[in-house]
């Protein structure tokens, strides 16, 4: 009470804002909180009341966050998926988002699976591929559960080449496919001969060249590259032209030293250079590396994965182990290419929200002024967005700063308690896929992780922490 | 349909701003389709698929191509013009909601923003959520004032138990009033600083005592609400006892006033013991306890709010300034008229209603109230008065879905009309509460109905006698003198306090039986 009566009254006002005004007018200091029922439910509010500033949760989050900060992702090679992804069985396909059965999958994902079956020669026609997929003879599993991430449908099959990223500090490995480019590609569910041929070219031509190049060059540090790209207008999810360019700069001298004919090298450069999203998959793998590093700290309420399979969105939390908390995948609030509108759109799809989970993408939107236009378009809006995301994260990452915000470090590590407490939902920048397989991207915009996911997650981790404690 | 195109050479805009432009163009009257794109091969093919583009167009990948389809030439021209302007547009107004940025997104964020200075969380959320916010605040090392009611007793016990071994205070739940270091919290008044410390259960009770202390020429050190159940057996008086202990050691407090509604016997004994150990005089106002307690040395027991204030001021060594205001000669106010014989008390402050009930219980019959503890005195229908009636308009049944009557006068205004039109109503008595949180100008809000009653057209005789008291100080924002003057102009007789007005009403009505 020595710090109360007789000290300057400094009030946090929760509720009727008039009370705060009266205090300020009388010479005291009051900050009003923009309050609404947390999680819209008394139950969630009560659990939250016990978890906020719970000493063990605070310690756990601090630990999880410092593990995230310590991750140093290194690109060490390109390898065949079956040769490096753990527990990758013969007849297995990895997909984006939380677990889902064939019969529940959205069309783009099914189309991609059909394409993968043909590519692997498991089936010689789309019809055969569908029966195979339906038969239960293929095992489907989330990329995330095998240390991998894939954009959009995110299908990884045994023969596909994948980037191999290693955390130099913790040693954990992460994997992602190579980006096929835009238009009619597998990840949007296309499976025509052009798609298959391109996948075969990537497997037989591009991947070996990249693999050899990386042996010659040695590992490439992704952290500094991404930091630099962030200061060149990339947000490393929807905008990757700078990072793609920087990657090519790094690879070029050793790629050029290949023994392959120059036409082969030309095709590789042409392929990578004409795709402004080429770096996306690597950005995802790097972010996966960081978040895997932070996963598995008991009692931590920090999110280590946000992923969508086009039907459901799922999150994973450091302190909740292998559990997925899921709900219906959100629709995207966006702008569309000519001829398309929201009636053609597939719900949110892909593992690329791993970038937001690590503090990039929409969380670093201010770095990419073009993307800021999705939230209004001005510097003020960019600032406000960063401010909002700051209110729901555990900390800041000083290695990744944004010039437009006076080199403010990015806010990272979404804390589910803070999400429920503030009512601010994490924002994701994302491409919009056509809901029919094979059409491709039809627009781009923002989506928010739905609030019920966080309420559920809070109650789940709440019951485990509060019961034990 | 007409289609028009325009090419802006060698201009780069990113895809998102171009898509936004397209969307905005489509909002213009008469425009059916609009596209703004970099004229890359891919985009040109996309446009051809929409059948808007003819085969050849003179545009290269670094040019911006605008294609607009409209229902008439005027709309088309307007659309193309707008597109060109948009490409030229310089500064754009910010969408950011300035006002919202001033609010903190959560308590934790607010505390962070106050950089270590936070020492109180004032919580007025809906009841079921208030306890959760309070737990958060305590965990962050803040004292808590819970304005909200509808917080469970179990939660109150848990919260207060949490503070047993620390310095932290939990004020409330249902704590409507506090004045800490002169700063009003919740519904409170601007009261002179001085040596009298006030602690107690009720909001308006504290407001009245503090305001009277000010009127009588003295001042307060701290005014601390503890909530209505603090002195129950389950809660055990945790907060009251902590506050008393603090007052004991506070150099600025010489006299202590405790205002209480109901006290568990066991807890009452603990409090008495505490009071005797304070080494400072204590005035205990036990509303609802009609007794003459044995005055132990240093403890003065009274049963009305005005007596509490008056006693405290005297004991503190001030001479009570009685010359301020109020009608003294009640007899002058008496006027018989028709069937009129009953009192109708319409209160915003529940404590005032309780105090009145205690004072009048033995004097007026039949007497009922909507909040009488004793079922025998409970009104059958709170919405309809018969006999002498004392109504707490702040009770749940009147406030469902509405702000408290101290803020929103509509329910009371309606009831005023209803009572005025009742040929049996002789005296209508009401409170006017000033200070923070209350209506900006309570009398103004009541003026229309008061004027109507003054006009006399509602009844065939002289009508009921209007009596009121103003609870507040001359430093309150609503201007105490202006409120009093306005009331008098509207034909209302003003009294010094809740206590005084009740005694006056009793005297007036007693004469009806003489």
Image (cartoon, coloured by chain):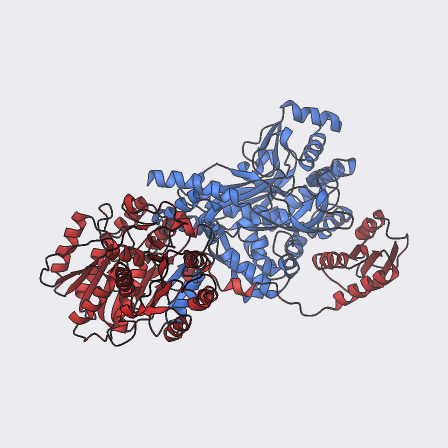
Q: What residue appears at the point 14 percent right and 65 percent down from the top-left corner?
A: B281
Q: Quadrant of residue B211?
A: bottom left
Instruction: Report whether A209 appears left or right of A422.
Output: right
Query: In the rendered view, would you say B454 is above or below B373?
Result: below
Colour chain A appears in: blue
Residue A127 in view of the camera: yes
Residue farthest to the right? Answer: B55
Instruction: Report whether A130 appears left or right of B509.
Output: right
Residue A10 in view of the camera: no
From the viewer's side, name the closer residue of A63 and B356. Answer: B356
Count of number-bearing discs: 0
Residue B495: image x %, image y %? 31, 68
Q: What residue appears at the point 18 percent right and 76 percent down from the top-left corner?
A: B319
From the viewer's side, name the closer residue of A369 and B389. Answer: B389
Colour chain B appears in: red
Q: What residue appears at the point 55 percent right and 57 percent down from the top-left corner?
A: A224
Residue A102: image x %, image y %? 63, 29
Instruction: Report whether A245 appears left or right of B198.
Output: right
């Amino acid at each position: 009470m020595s710090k109360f009566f007789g000290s300057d009254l400094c009030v946090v006002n929760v509720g009727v804002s008039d009370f705060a005004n009266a205090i300020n007018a009388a010479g005291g200091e009051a900050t009003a909180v923009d309050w609404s029922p947390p999680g819209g439910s008394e139950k969630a509010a009560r659990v939250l009341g016990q978890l906020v500033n719970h000493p063990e949760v605070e310690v756990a989050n601090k630990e999880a966050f410092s593990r995230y900060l310590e991750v140093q992702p290194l690109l060490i090679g390109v390898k065949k998926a079956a040769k490096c992804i753990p527990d990758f069985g013969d007849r297995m396909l990895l997909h984006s988002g939380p677990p889902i059965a064939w019969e529940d999958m959205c069309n783009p994902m099914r189309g991609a699976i059909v394409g993968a079956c043909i590519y692997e020669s498991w089936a010689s026609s789309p019809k055969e591929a569908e029966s195979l997929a339906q038969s239960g003879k293929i095992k489907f599993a989330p990329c995330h559960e095998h240390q991998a991430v894939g954009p959009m449908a995110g299908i990884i099959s045994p023969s596909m080449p994948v980037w191999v990223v290693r955390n130099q500090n913790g040693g954990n490995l992460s994997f992602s496919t190579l980006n096929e480019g835009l238009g009619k590609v597998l990840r949007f569910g296309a499976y025509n001969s052009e798609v298959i041929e391109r996948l075969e070219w990537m497997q037989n031509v591009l991947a070996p060249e990249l693999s050899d190049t990386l042996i010659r060059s040695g590992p490439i540090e992704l952290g500094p590259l991404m930091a630099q790209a962030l200061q060149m207008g990339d947000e490393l999810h929807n905008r990757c032209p700078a990072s793609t360019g920087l990657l090519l700069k790094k690879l070029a001298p050793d790629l050029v030293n290949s023994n392959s004919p120059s036409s082969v090298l030309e095709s590789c450069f042409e392929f990578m250079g004409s795709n402004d999203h080429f770096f996306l998959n690597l950005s995802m793998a790097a972010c996966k590396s960081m978040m895997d590093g932070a996963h598995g700290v008991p009692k931590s309420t920090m999110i280590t994965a946000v992923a969508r399979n086009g039907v459901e969105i799922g999150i994973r939390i450091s302190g909740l182990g292998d559990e997925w908390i899921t709900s219906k995948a959100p629709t995207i609030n966006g702008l569309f290419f000519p001829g398309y509108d929201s009636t053609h759109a597939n719900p949110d799809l892909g593992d690329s929200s791993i970038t937001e989970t690590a503090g990039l993408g929409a969380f670093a939107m201010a770095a990419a002024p073009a993307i800021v236009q999705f939230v209004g378009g001005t510097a003020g809006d960019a600032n406000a967005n960063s401010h909002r995301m700051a209110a729901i994260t555990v900390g800041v990452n000083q290695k990744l700063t944004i010039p437009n915000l006076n080199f403010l470090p990015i806010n990272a590590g979404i804390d589910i308690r803070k999400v429920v407490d503030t009512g601010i939902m994490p924002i994701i920048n994302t491409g919009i896929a056509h809901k029919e397989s094979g059409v491709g991207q039809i627009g781009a915009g923002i989506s928010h992780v739905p609030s019920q996911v966080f309420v559920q997650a809070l109650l789940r981790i709440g019951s485990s922490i509060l019961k034990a404690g | 349909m007409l289609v028009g195109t325009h090419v802006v050479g060698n201009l780069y805009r990113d895809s998102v701003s171009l898509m936004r432009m397209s969307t905005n163009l489509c909002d213009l009257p008469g425009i059916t389709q609009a596209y703004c794109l970099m004229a890359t091969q891919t985009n040109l093919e996309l446009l051809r698929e929409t059948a808007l583009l003819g085969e050849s167009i003179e545009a290269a990948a670094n040019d911006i191509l605008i294609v607009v389809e409209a229902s008439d030439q005027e709309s088309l021209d307007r659309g193309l013009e707008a597109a060109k302007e948009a490409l030229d547009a310089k500064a754009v107004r910010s969408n950011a909601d300035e006002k919202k940025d001033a609010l903190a997104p959560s308590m934790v964020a607010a505390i962070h923003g106050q950089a270590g200075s936070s020492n109180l969380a004032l919580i007025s959320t809906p009841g079921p959520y208030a306890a959760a916010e309070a737990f958060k605040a305590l965990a962050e090392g803040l004292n808590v004032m819970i304005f909200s009611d509808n917080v469970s007793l179990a939660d109150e016990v848990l919260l207060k138990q949490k503070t047993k071994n620390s310095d932290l205070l939990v004020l409330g739940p249902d704590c409507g009033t506090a004045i800490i270091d002169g700063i009003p919290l919740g519904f409170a008044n601007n009261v002179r600083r001085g040596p009298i410390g006030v602690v107690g259960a009720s909001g308006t009770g504290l407001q009245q005592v503090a305001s009277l202390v000010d009127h009588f020429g003295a001042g307060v050190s701290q005014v601390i609400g503890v909530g209505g159940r603090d002195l129950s057996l389950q809660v055990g008086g945790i907060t009251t006892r902590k506050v008393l202990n603090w007052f004991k050691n506070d150099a600025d407090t010489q006299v202590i006033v405790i205002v209480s509604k109901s006290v568990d016997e066991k807890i009452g004994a603990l409090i008495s013991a505490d009071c005797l150990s304070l080494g400072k005089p204590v005035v205990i106002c036990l509303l609802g306890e009609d007794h003459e307690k044995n005055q132990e040395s240093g403890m003065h027991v009274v049963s009305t709010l005005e007596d509490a204030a008056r006693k405290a001021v005297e004991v503190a060594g001030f001479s009570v300034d009685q010359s301020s205001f109020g009608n003294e000669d009640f007899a002058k106010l008496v006027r018989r008229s028709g069937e009129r014989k009953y009192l109708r008390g319409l209160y915003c402050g529940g404590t005032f209603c309780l105090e009145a009930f205690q004072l009048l219980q033995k004097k007026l019959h039949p007497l009922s109230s909507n909040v009488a503890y004793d079922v025998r005195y409970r009104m059958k229908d709170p919405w309809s008065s018969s006999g002498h009636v004392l109504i707490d308009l702040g009770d749940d049944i009147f406030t469902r879905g509405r702000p408290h009557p101290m803020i929103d006068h509509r329910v009371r205004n309606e009831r005023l009309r209803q009572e005025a039109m009742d040929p049996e109503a002789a005296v209508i008595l009401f409170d006017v509460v000033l200070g923070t949180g209350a209506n900006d100008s309570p009398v103004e809000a009541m003026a229309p109905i008061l004027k109507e009653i003054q006009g006399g057209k509602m009844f065939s005789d002289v009508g009921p006698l209007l009596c009121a008291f103003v609870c507040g100080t001359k430093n309150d924002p609503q201007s105490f003198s202006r409120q009093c003057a306005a009331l008098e102009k509207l034909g209302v007789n003003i009294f010094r306090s809740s206590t005084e007005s009740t005694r006056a009403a009793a005297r007036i009505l007693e004469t009806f039986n003489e």
